[in-house]
Image (spheres, helix red, strand yellow):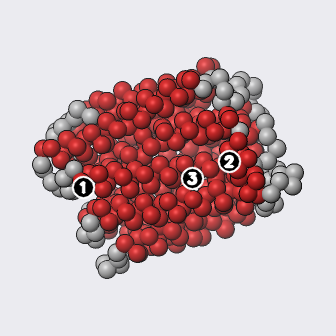
Amino acid sequence: MSAAVLPRREVLAYGVLGLPLAFAALPIYVHVPKLYADSLGLPLALVGGALLGARILDAISDPLIGQLSDRARSRRWLIAFGLLPLGLGVLALLRPPEAAGALWLIAALTVAYAGYSLANINYQAWGARMAPTPLDRTRVVASREGFGLLGVVLAATLPAMLATDAADGLAALALVFVPVLLIAGLLTLGSVGRDAVPAGDGVPPLSMLISVLGNPAFRRLLTVFAVGGIAAAVPATTVLFFVDDVIGQGARAGLFLAAYFVAGAMSLPLWVALARRVGKVRAWLLGMLVSIVAFAWAAGLGAGDGSAFFVICLASGLALGADLTLPPAILADQLAESRAGDGACFGWWNFVTKANLALAAGVALPLLALLGYAPGGQDEAALRALAIVYAGVPVGLKLIAAVLLWRWRNELGEAR
């Protein structure tokens, strides 16, 4: 792999904005289902349906946002414009009135998602184009995801530190988020250059949106990313229920989440070094195998197995580092061979990410309700169903993703 060119200061400055973007994502994807089901008393199936509807709408809009962004002259201003609705949406989502129902949930999600999509798609596309070498592309992604994991750890641990009640902790978290978003935005947008959007040679936007899917390397990478992403989204949606009712240690949920994300953050230099040595595709495959082993172990856990689950969180966090760093770095390598369409590609990329989460919430939660599981219940068969959904389903999907990745390893366009 060629030597790095970008100064470390610029790589770090770019990555800072990843902190509030991930900070916002964790409570939306992990805490919101439990907040609205437990604290506000909405039926679990209704919460799952509302999340599914909002996320589908959000996911569909991402490719359109991406291709329209490719027609702008500056990604910097598009990112700044997206941060405002993101901040407002998170405030509304985590500080709902007592009478809030499904409509409030959908409206708050829609506002937050719109801002997040506009900011994040352009942030990712900006990072892919600012890195001139394959190693720099891995470093830029690792910086973004490293700060992102720090943001996730803060979002996971702060609610319990800010208030003893979970709902009050999330409400206080929203007030912390706004200044963090402002400061990080100013640091990144004011310190990083290379903001030009590559010209599209006059290609109509809708044609560009479709044409990027015609690239076999991108299409196959997107497929592997989608299957592996669903495998990660199912436990993300159900982990708090699993910790509460299967492990029986809900009070330690923040510790488990922190261990998972800290392990992911600490593993990033390892995956950068491993990718440099064996290639990004093979390093990603190894990360998948680690995840498979970890969740296969988790499927057999029961009440009181908190120590074992802590180790599993560390192992699956190690695998998380590979999932976060290597797929977008491979995509950046692919984009380095093209002249335009960065936003369109990352629009599809974010579409898949959010479709995965939508499927996880919209299918896993109603499925658990159908199988007889209810939060706080102790029926043995229902708890076994929860364990299978939380851990068994991800193992099967990761195996499929690993097989596809190995089969297409020579066709993904990786640069070393």
Residue 132 makes an appearance in the image: no
Labelled disc at residue 369: 1
Three-letter code for the amino acid on which mark 2 is drawn: Cys
* First of labels 1, 3 by sequence position: 3
Labelled disc at residue 351: 3
* Label pair 2/3, CB-CB below 8 angstroms: no
Labelled disc at residue 345: 2
Q: Nearer the viewer, residue 192 or 408?
A: 408
Q: How many marks?
A: 3
Q: Residue 136 at x, y = what percent?
A: 71, 35
Alpha carbon of mark 1 to alpha carbon of mark 3: how far? 27 Å
Q: Residue 107 at x, y = what percent?
A: 47, 73
Element at badge 2? Answer: helix
Q: Nearer the viewer, residue 167 or 106?
A: 106
> Is 357 drawn above or below residue 324 in the view shown?
below
* First of labels 2, 3 by sequence position: 2
Element at badge 3? Answer: helix
Three-letter code for the amino acid on which mark 1 is drawn: Ala
Q: Left or right of 89: which side holds 412?
A: right
- Of circles 1 and 2, the one toward us is 1
Alpha carbon of mark 1 to alpha carbon of mark 2: how far? 36 Å
* First of labels 1, 2 by sequence position: 2
